[in-house]
Amino acid sequence: MAAFPQTGIVISADGIQGQFEAELSLQGKDDSKVRVQFSNGQHLWVSTEELIPQAEGHYLLPLPVARLTEAPEENGKEHVIPVMQETLEVEKRQVETGGVRITKIVREHEEIIDEPLLRETVDVQRVAINQFIEAPVAVRFENDTMIMPVLEEVLVVEKRLLLKEELHIHRHQTTIHQPQTVVRRSEEVQMEHFSHPKSKEAGDEFCK
């Protein structure tokens, strides 16, 4: 700890300026106190621990000189200055500072969908046969063509089957487009920040 200087300026809490010098000390009897001569004529013995150094170079005595009295020097009594210390009491509390309002908007817009669709068409072709057969003929396929026999009974000296004709059915596949208009929905979210009217009052009260 640095040694206390031999001279300096002291300003009390009520703004009265004083000065202490080496020759006004206790001259080795008690280095922890100095004698301060104030401008109002008062002089006090002050503990060096009570003097708070300031950035401007002087010392602050956190006590008002007007409330202090010094006993006469000739009676050998010293004035006692109480040492005080401030303490902090910290509290926390919840303060409503605002909120968030969320608004959901549903928007509709038209969208064109053009997807390929499969459509089948058939061509029926009649092919004359007019041949007698021994038994019925089943339906058969030749590539993409389905052949369906058409039978007819005719009267002859004997009963025989006559293949009258065949139906050649060809299947064709084509791709077409049928644009359609559909409604598709999408959602958007808007947020609006607002301050609670009591939050500012609570904040001002908290800062006091």
Image: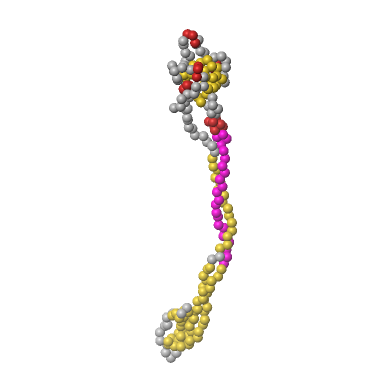
Residue at 43 percent across and 80 percent down: it is: 140
Quadrant of the drawing holding the N terminus: top left
Where is residue 52 drawn, in percent x and y? 50, 24
Residue at 53 percent across and 71 percent down: it is: 175
Where is residue 200 drawn, in percent x and y? 56, 34
Q: Is residue 94 visible from the viewing direction of this image? A: yes
Q: Which residues are magenta?
A: 178-200
Q: Is residue 199 covered in magenta?
A: yes
Residue at 47 percent across and 19 percent down: it is: 33
Farthest left residue in view: 135
Q: Is residue 62 visible from the viewing direction of this image? A: no
Where is residue 206 drawn, in percent x and y? 53, 31
Who is closer to the viewer here, 20 or 199? Answer: 20
Who is closer to the viewer here, 163 or 89? Answer: 89
Farthest bottom residue in view: 157
Who is closer to the viewer here, 121 or 42? Answer: 42
Where is residue 87 drawn, in percent x and y? 47, 26
Q: Is residue 73 above or below residue 21?
A: above
